[in-house]
Amino acid sequence: MTAGTTVTTTVPPDITAWPPLDEDKRSAGQRLLHWAADGEGPRLCLVRGAGGSGKSALLAWLLAGTVGRPGLTIHATVPSEGLTTETFAWELGRQLGYGALSPDRLLDRVGADERPLLLLVPDLHRAGAGPADLPSAASETLVAELLEQLLALPHLRAAVEVGTSALLATHSGATVVDLGEGDGRDIGRASYADLAAAVPRTADDRPDWSRAPAPVRRRILDAALRTDGQEAAVRGLLTDPGFLVHGSAAALTATLADERIPVPGRLRGVWRLAAPELTAYHADSAERAALLHAAAIGTDPDLAEYLRPLAAQHWWSAEWSRPTLPVTALALIPGEERRLMASDATGRLRTYDAKGGTGAPLTASLRLPDEAAASPSVHPLAVRPRSLAPRDARSALLLDGSDALLPLVTEDDPTTAFALGRIAEHHGAAALNEEESLVTALGGGGTRSPYAVVGDRGGSVHVWSLGEYQDVPHSHRVHEQPVTAAVCVDTADGLTLTFTAGADGSVRLWEISAEPMPVPVQQRPSRTTALAAADTSVGPVLAVAWSDGGVHLWHVLSGRMRELPWLRRCDAVALTSEGLLVIADSEGLSAVKLRLDVLWEQ
């Protein structure tokens, strides 16, 4: 949904300018439209009516009419059938631009949001999922745990479909749009046997969930929980990887939350990790397989192996996972694409094999030079690298958590030590003279020669060669806000492209022999957490990790973008020329193979 500001108007919108509406619905449509446009009236509109009366269709009509029409913005529409408090919060957070958040964190973010927000909530009376004896199965739980608190916020308004229930009936003064009698349909109570009979079979008589009707996939797990043979029916679904890929993600999330229900292998932990992304409406079956495979690859080998062929058909799939301490800094070593340099939360630096299929460590922890170390320990405890710019496998510039640049030279190499020390000294002296020169970001890159890209609080970017001595850097004011991430890449036609992110959510491009691009590559209300770039077989590719959990992949020459959903927030990323994206997060390192030949086809 498009975010924006709802404009209050005292002139009711003309219903004839909206999409066509059946004659018997025009009065209800006019009433709903007037409520939506009147920012000074009741903040809650209840859309009532029996099954088949057209309630959901009326809300869809209102939403369709706002598309491309200024003056009225619907900020989020959350169809609530089968959602619990948690899955509703995830979806609302995604649509409002925060990412999938817990209910408590969502309430905090909405409370701090300065926009007057307008929400549509179809099918609230069909909310709830999981075992019937748990609160999550009742729509009243979603109301009590989340909707009531949202509706207490003075800048939030909502139109909510409640059927013939008494949900939210205690809100006196709410506008009510009642569509009356319907055709009596109750599509939510079909038996498990009837739903199971509607699932096509494969040649070897297994359920073919890829061809099952959408209502069957959406409702069969809840029906299994109600049937007399509940245990066997539920077990049959949870042990079928095809159902895990095609079944209702919201129903599976609610069911697997019940510790009383036995599950195969480590499915409960795998699902829990992937659930916030699996429940996103954009996740098709191939992407769900890729997400589940990524969650299982380091946790449940049997499930991972089953999902691998289907995940490999998607445009991205997990290659390996190396659980370890949280990784805070990560970079490819120039000239040695199979090698990564990484720092964990304790400050230890290691190198890893990026392309070996396992991400195996290649060296023990690297040491700072003797004059920087307090003892022969693997690393001074006071140093916590938050970004790296390697020169080679034995030397690098580090940006410490204290915003200090530090040289790392692990062998007796006075020339390299002098060059790296000169860069650190240059920026240290500049920061002492001017607060705007304080270093806030460090990145690396380069294939013809290794580079370090330094960003500062004033928005300036400084590019240094690490391959040869350079007295002063190439510098330019690129951002209006402090620089938060940086990376550079050499292209086949001899250009050196520098990408940097600012605290205002902008990502900018600067070719160091020219002026920076006049407009950002991207501008979002989130914060960039990491950048990576590589010159690939399809040209330069930029990876941007965001604080809301998204990872955006840009084809630089065409400007096309694809979003890669990930299981956790990315703290650092690295990208090889062959399309291997290595992600560092709170659980360690993971590698994702990108199919560059099909990545931007859709």
Image (cartoon, rainbow, N blue to C red):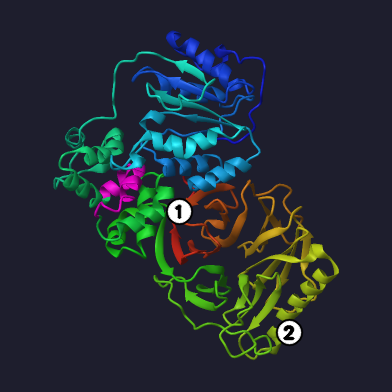
Residues shaded magenta: 242-262
**The magenta stretch spans residue 248:** yes
> As displayed, is residue 324 above or below residue 410?
above
> As displayed, is residue 373 above or below residue 230?
below
Residue at 43% x, 49% y is 276
Q: Is residue 13 left or right of residue 261?
A: right
**The magenta stretch spans residue 267:** no
Specify the amino acid type for callout 1: Asp
Report helix, strand or loop for mark 1.
loop
Circle 1 Cα neighbour tier, 10 Å, few/some/many (<14 / 14–19 / ≥20): few
Residue at 55% x, 78% y is 348
User: How far apart are the two marked residues, 1 and 2, measured between alpha carbons?
Assistant: 43 Å
Could you tell which of marks 1 and 2 lies nearer the N-terminus? 2
Q: Is residue 365 left or right of residue 297?
A: right
Residue bearing mark 1: 597
> As displayed, is residue 441 above or below residue 552?
below
Residue bearing mark 2: 418
Report helix, strand or loop for mark 2.
helix
Toward which corner of the image does residue 136 lie, by quadrant? top left
Specify the amino acid type for callout 2: Phe
Q: Is residue 304 visible?
A: yes
